[in-house]
Amino acid sequence: MALLRNHIAAITGAGSGIGRAIASGYAREGARVVLLDINATAAAEAAREIRDAGGKAESFALDVTRRDDCHAVARQIADIAGPVSILVNNAGITRRNGISGATEAVIKDWEDIIAINLTGVFNVTHAFMDSLRATRGRIVNIGSVQSFMHLRTPTSPAYTASKHGVLGLTRALAAELGKDGVRVNAIGPGFIETPLNEKVRASDPGLVKIFVDHTPLGRAGKPEDIVGPAIFLASDLSAFVTGSIVMADGGYRTI
Ligand code: NAP
């Protein structure tokens, strides 16, 4: 069953981790995938891997904080591939400092995280709006358990604020774009083993244990754990679902 045949899907942060897994999963379901990442080499390599496996993929360098570049890349993709009907806003960073550190560092964390994780979602969505309206498209935003809560493990206020913002933006856009047939949903991953948390996993196994002990399914997630929900929200299987967040967190928020 090819659930995404005839779709063109753009995925930000697709050179690594969750975005890379979603791009491969969408390609397996028949979508033509466009991988966008600040790391052009990683995106190109991931696209090549998909093509080698028989999928349709291309890649572009994109820093989601650069608004003009977002619009330029959206125009380029429309010219080369056609209108994007699925957008996955996945690019994100994290830092694990509170508000009590050195002022310059605290301010830099705030500005970088909000610029990428929240304003980046706005920039890219705005850039693809014409294509998404024309195709009655689907937007999938990557939130977090931190769309609902802060964590006791080291993390920054900016990260929690940005992911709360992603959920708010998801709901606002779902409300506005429903009349155009555009559906907007989010996924809330729990702790997923990716390069984003590679360092902390290596240096602080106690942190992973705190997560796993709090997770009813008793394990950390893998990028592949996010692929099924991402296919569901992009496909007609979720035709009456909008403004929702699908938690893929092993049950973290239930206890
Ligand atoms: P990842 O492996 O670090 O992948 C993120 C990708 O986004 C990287 O290729 C990164 O490039 C790229 N990127 C960073 N800044 C960018 C920018 N300005 N413009 C475009 N691309 C940019 O992280 P991940 O764990 O897959 O995370 C993906 C999303 O899931 C993020 O939104 C994250 O907040 C969310 N999430 C992750 C977890 C988790 O436990 N892993 C849990 C909840 C939510 P560089 O490597 O060059 O920076």
Image: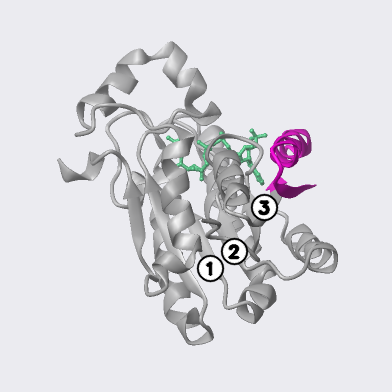
Locate residue 181 relative to residue 209 in the image: left or right. right
Secondary structure of the residue carrying numbered label 2: strand
**From where the camera sits, is residue 51 visible?**
yes
Q: Provide the residue designation for mark 2.
A: 86
Q: Find residue 64 and name its label.
A: 3
Marks 2/1: CA–CA distance:
5 Å
Residue sitting at the far bottom: 179
Question: Which amino acid, by three-letter code, is at mark 2?
Answer: Ile
Residue at 34 percent across and 55 percent down: it is 246
Counting residues from the start of the chain, the first of labels 3 and 1 encountered is 3
Quadrant of the drawing holding the C terminus: top left
Counting residues from the start of the chain, the first of labels 3 and 2 encountered is 3
Residue at 29 percent across and 52 percent down: it is 148
Disc nearest the viewer among 3 and 1: 1
Q: Provide the residue designation for mark 1.
A: 138
The answer to whether marks 2 and 1 mark residues whose Cβ atoms lie closer than 8 Å is yes
Q: Is mark 3 within 8 Å of ligand 1?
A: yes
Disc nearest the viewer among 3 and 2: 2
Secondary structure of the residue carrying numbered label 3: loop
**Whole-percent x, y for residue 200 in the image:** 45, 20
